[in-house]
Amino acid sequence: MPVETMPPPTMRPIWILLAAIIGVELLGQSAQGQDSGGVVKEGKRLYLSNCAVCHGQNGDGKGPAATQLTVKPRDFQGGVFKFRSTPSGSLPRDNDIDATLIRGVRGTAMVPQRHLRAAERQAVIAYLKTFSERFKREQPGAPVKVPSPPPATPTVIAQGREIYRKAQCAECHGEGGRGDGPSARTMKDDRGFPLAVPDLTQRPLKRGSEPEALFYTITTGLNGTPMPSYSDSLDPGEIWALVRYLDSLAPSKRRQPLDRLLPGEETIGQKIEEEARRASAR
């Protein structure tokens, strides 16, 4: 999808102007830092300058740039997170959220936040957790154990192909894994927004390209979406066989480098974030 060039300052969309307003608040906070406000206050400062333009000042996913995006930003107020190492329905661990900050969510405007140091990311995580009461009432689940993967032999891949059929994965993902199954057109998330079913024949997927990422997605499900956990219906060996089959669907020519932004939502997200950070620094 072609990416439009950014318009001149006098013609920039309203989200940039709103980001500048957010920046006024940041100017008063940035001088105070950790000593007077603590980790959460520092996290708020970083969140407002890096995240609020999409996720909203109140963490509701309704930032000024959200209307520009096909894949809508996560609403943190419900405490529902897709990418976790914890069982379905449970809260993520801090390192799960940190992994998303480092990696981003591929194919979306949520680009990697590698410009933030580890301590800054931990401050942002501490602040994100203040948006949802769930973090006050509940503890994250224990991380799912990932056993050693089997080799990607023809036998294992054939087993995975049969599991794909029996688990009715093609209903959403299609017979060839291209995201064109009969239910794909009606997919919606927990907020009622339309969902694009991933094309499993290309990489990276939203969680990345590593087989372990696919193992986690199949085992834990993606909370807030129709993608369920298969931990009750498939044992770890079967899940690994399914992962090996899914990985066989993506030839090298359909695998993009991990360090390259994809055209479309990722490059748009990068421009949105850069503009927001510049506005908050003024």
Image: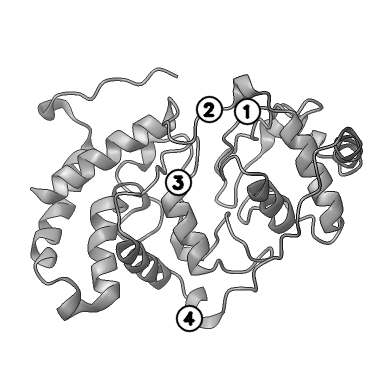
Of tags 3 and 2, the one toward the viewer is: 2
Look at the numbered discs 2 and 1 and tell me whether their residues touch, using CB distance below 8 Å: yes
Q: What residue sits 32% from the left and 36% below the top?
A: 270
Q: Distance between the residues labelled 3 and 1?
A: 17 Å
Q: How far apart are marks 3 and 2 (CA)?
A: 15 Å
Number of the label disc, if any, that sits on residue 104: 3
| Rendering coords of residue 183 (x, y %) | 75, 34
Q: Please say if 161 is above or below 75.
A: above
Give the quarter of the image for residue 172. Answer: top right
In the figure, is residue 64 to the left or right of 25?
A: right
Give the quarter of the image for residue 128. Answer: bottom left
Lower position in the chain sequence, tag 2 or tag 1: 1
Q: Can residue 172 be seen in this view?
A: no
Q: Mark 1 is on which residue type?
A: Gln
Pointer 2 local density, CA inside 10 Å: few below 14, some 14–19, many at least 20: some
Write down the residue under mark 1. Answer: 202
Write down the residue under mark 4. Answer: 136
Query: What secondary structure is found at the residue carrying circle 4?
Result: helix
| Rendering coords of residue 146 (x, y %) | 72, 60
Of tags 4 and 2, the one toward the viewer is: 2
Look at the numbered discs 4 and 1 and tell me whether their residues touch, using CB distance below 8 Å: no
Q: Where's the N terminus, which quadrant?
A: top left
Lower position in the chain sequence, tag 3 or tag 2: 3
Lower position in the chain sequence, tag 3 or tag 1: 3
Query: What secondary structure is found at the residue carrying circle 2?
Result: loop
Give the quarter of the image for residue 173. Answer: top right
Q: Nearer the viewer, residue 140 or 14?
A: 140
| Rendering coords of residue 91 (x, y %) | 57, 69
Q: What residue sits 42% from the left and 70% below the top?
A: 129
Q: How far apart are marks 2 and 1 (CA)?
A: 8 Å
